[in-house]
């Protein structure tokens, strides 16, 4: 993964109608973007956003990004693939309608875990309704954590296209996701070009940042984080707008995961509530044994006394306006100072109270 992450810089592309877009400048076969907008920042900073509001939060930024890609001539013969059920959060059809992009068809796949007793032994595509459009742009929206589901579904789709002697022009992928997706998509592009040399590659759009996952065996400073599931900033690239908003709050940075389970937030709200409350109740119970400085460094992704030059390199902000980056660096220092004397136990109590009050109607 390091070969795809060294010397990468965030470069501004556009700022239109409240949506900011940045590209990743690095040694890539594919195109990678980060977009930021008020509603997606709210979604990822407030786990209180549930149900239909999860879907609605993504409409404006997705539409604006599709307009950008359309103007660059990167979308033709749009064919949407929905990977049930988390993909239903992504408003690709509505965004295409908003930007006058014709959707030729919509396909559906369900990828489910295969169990051998209690253990997961693999993944299997169960339900499938696949429409194939030759030389088309396949459009997908889904969360990337480990990336296993995405790979399984894409290989299934590609095999179907090959069997029909058809091909894809490119793949546009919208995601709330982790950096592991980049190495996966880079490898898939090499694989696909082995039989479709003219394949243009993936155009991947990350909402608010390219996050990282806790790795196997690492439950985090809090002792409750899940590997290949929970997203955090460390080792990722965060949009400056998302960084600014998160650090203007207090508890948001310390949530268990930047997004939690996207499917549960939309369709199984009680499960989502249980997960959030389980986390903050764990923090409440173990607050006296959790070192606040170490926890803050984990969540920010670097040492609290990091220098400005090292911070620029760590955030990949070298290509951004220097006044902006200095302001963000100074804001982070102010955020750290604001935590002095803050009780983690009181923070947990505040989050439990605010969360349950906001979502009372969903709690049985």
Image (tube, helix red, strand yellow):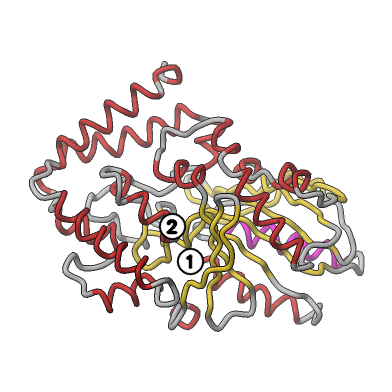
Q: Nearer the viewer, mark 2 or mark 1?
A: 1
Dot 1, crowdedness within 10 Å: few (<14), some or many (≥20)?
A: many
The residue furthest front is 323
Q: Which residue is mark 2?
A: 228
Q: Which residue is mark 1?
A: 179
Residue at the image position 70 percent from the left and 47 percent from the top: 92
The quarter of the displayed image where residue 187 is located: bottom right
Give the magenta range: 148-162
Gap between marks 2 and 1, in whole Å? Answer: 11 Å
Residue at the image position 36 percent from the left and 60 percent from the top: 233
Residue 358's place in the image compared with 323, above or below, is: above
Q: Is residue 268 left or right of residue 326?
A: right
Marked residue nearer the N-terminal end (2 or 1)? 1
Residue 298 in picture, x, y percent from top left: 25, 60
Residue 242 in picture, x, y percent from top left: 41, 54
Q: Are marks 2 and 1 in contact (CB under 8 Å)?
A: no
Residue 83 in picture, x, y percent from top left: 68, 48
Q: Is residue 6 left or right of residue 100?
A: left
Task: Give the camera-side residue of 196 and 46.
Answer: 46
Residue at the image position 41 percent from the left and 19 percent from the top: 363
Please, what secondary structure does the residue beneath circle 2 have? loop
Please, what secondary structure does the residue beneath circle 1 have? loop
Task: Give the camera-side residue of 4 and 49.
Answer: 49
Give the position of the C terminus as an image quadrant: top left
Residue 299's place in the image compared with 110, above or below, is: below
- Residue 256 is a magenta residue: no
Residue 116's place in the image compared with 281, above or below, is: below
Dot 2, crowdedness within 10 Å: few (<14), some or many (≥20)?
A: some
């Amino acid at each position: 993964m390091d070969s795809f992450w060294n010397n990468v810089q965030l470069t501004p592309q556009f700022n239109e109608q409240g949506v900011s877009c940045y590209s990743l400048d690095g040694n890539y076969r594919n195109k990678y973007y980060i977009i930021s907008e008020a509603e997606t920042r709210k979604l990822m900073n407030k786990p209180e956003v549930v149900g239909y509001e999860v879907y609605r939060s993504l409409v404006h930024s997705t539409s604006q990004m599709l307009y950008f890609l359309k103007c660059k001539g990167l979308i033709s013969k749009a064919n949407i693939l929905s990977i049930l059920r988390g993909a239903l959060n992504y408003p690709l059809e509505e965004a295409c309608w908003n930007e006058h992009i014709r959707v030729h068809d919509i396909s559906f796949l369900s990828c489910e875990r295969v169990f051998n007793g209690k253990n997961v032994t693999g993944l299997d595509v169960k339900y499938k309704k696949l429409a194939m459009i030759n030389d088309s742009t396949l459009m997908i929206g889904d969360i990337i954590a480990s990336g296993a589901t995405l790979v399984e579904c894409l290989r299934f789709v590609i095999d179907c296209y090959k069997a029909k002697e058809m091909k894809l022009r490119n793949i546009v992928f919208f995601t709330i996701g982790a950096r592991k997706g980049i190495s996966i998509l880079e490898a898939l592009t090499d694989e696909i070009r082995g039989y479709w040399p003219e394949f243009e590659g993936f155009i991947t759009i990350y909402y608010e940042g390219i996050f990282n996952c806790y790795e196997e065996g690492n439950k985090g400073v809090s002792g409750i984080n899940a590997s290949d599931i929970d997203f955090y900033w460390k080792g990722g690239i965060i949009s400056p707008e998302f960084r600014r908003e998160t650090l203007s709050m207090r508890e948001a940075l310390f949530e268990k995961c930047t997004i939690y389970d996207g499917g549960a937030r939309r369709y199984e709200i009680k499960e989502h509530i249980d997960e959030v409350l389980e986390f903050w109740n764990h923090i409440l119970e173990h607050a006296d044994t959790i070192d606040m400085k170490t926890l803050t460094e984990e969540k920010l992704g670097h040492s609290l006394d990091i220098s400005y030059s090292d911070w620029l390199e760590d955030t990949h902000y070298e290509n951004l306006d220097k006044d902006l980056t200095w302001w963000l660096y100074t804001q982070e220092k102010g955020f750290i100072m604001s935590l002095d004397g803050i009780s983690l136990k009181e923070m947990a109590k505040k989050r439990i109270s605010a969360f349950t009050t906001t979502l009372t109607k969903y709690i049985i």
